Image: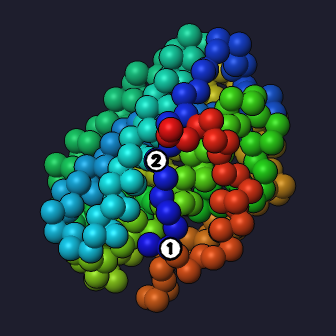
Amino acid sequence: MANKITPRRPNFDFSVEIPRHWLESSPFKTHLCNSFTLLFPTGEKFFIRSIQKFMSRLENEELRLAAKAFIQQEAQHAIEHDKFLKNLREQGYDIDPILKLVDEVITKFVENNTSQSFQLALTAGFEHLTSLLAEIGLSENFFQEATPVMKSLFEWHAMEEIEHRAVAFDVLQSVDSSYRHRVAGLISAYAILSGLCALVTANLLWQDKLLFKKKTIQDGLDVFFLKHQLFPKALSIFTRYLKPSFHPEDESHLESLLVRFYPRESTEVA
């Protein structure tokens, strides 16, 4: 593990003044990000459990320590995003059916119908995708015009996803080095993440009665194909994982993002 993984405990205050469309006054961009907030509490807990199931089999002490730090970081991510759910409720969004759907897919279906080793491969795949999104979001300054506390939340989370990007992968390789298993985890993670994000984003836009508005469609095109080009950039990063020799720590260009977006000392554990 090349990076030192530092558990931090920011305590974000999500005031009632945060606007409904907190990212560039764009409903599409805001709800795309809100979709992640609705997925993260359940998803992060799944990642933690998938790693914990193999902790006793980790013989490398450095990896064991990294896995413990990974668990601490992911637990804090779940806590902070969960706090913002109160804001969404107070803004009038009916999010409980969404949370139930996420729990049905991840906690009940996946954990009840797949092996522990596949759940670990799935977690490694999810971690590549969240690191992918973090890389694009930070390098593009995607949150530059967001409400300050939301900018801090997403940039802190993105930075830590990059910081611990190799942990789940290394745990997987230590217990199951099958290339086919690794790729199956990535493809399954992509299907679950993209499917849930699309459904949740569409649902929130529908609740706003803005799903088919011209600005919504234009912002979607800007994010995925025109201005930010999320789709082609994500596809390029996605395919890195398919190389048999791939390892997350080989992505040395990400170190500059860690330096640039490292949280202030006030957010670190004393």
Q: Nearer the viewer, residue 72 or 80?
A: 72
Dot 2 falls on a residue whose secondary structure is loop
Query: In the displayed structure, does residue 14 sit left or right of residue 112?
Result: right
Residue lying farthest to the front in this orientation: 270
Residue density around tag 1, few if under 14, some if 14–19, many if 20 or more, within 10 Å? few
The quarter of the displayed image where residue 92 is located: top right
Q: Amino acid at mark 1?
A: Ala
Q: Which residue is mark 1?
A: 2
| Number of numbered markers | 2
Q: Quadrant of the N terminus?
A: bottom left
Give the Cα distance between marks 1 and 2.
16 Å
Colour setting:
rainbow
Relative image position of residue 263 (x, y in whole percent):
65, 45
Query: In the displayed structure, does residue 232 sit left or right of residue 163?
Result: right
Residue under the image location 64 percent in, 15 percent down: 15
Q: Amino acid at mark 2?
A: Pro
Relative image position of residue 219 (x, y in whole percent):
78, 42
Mark closest to the chain's N terminus, 1 or 2? 1
Relative image position of residue 68 (x, y in whole percent):
33, 54
Give the label on residue 135, or none.
none
- Residue 117 showing in the rendered view: yes
Relative image position of residue 7 (x, y in whole percent):
46, 47
Residue under the image location 70 percent in, 60 percent down: 259
Query: In the displayed structure, does residue 71 sit left or right of residue 221?
Result: left
Q: Nearer the viewer, residue 26 or 130?
A: 130
Residue under the image location 67 percent in, 37 percent down: 152
Q: Which residue is mark 2?
A: 7
Residue under the image location 21 percent in, 61 percent down: 55
Q: Nearer the viewer, residue 62 or 126?
A: 62
Q: Is residue 91 above or below residue 78?
A: above
- Residue 153 showing in the rendered view: no
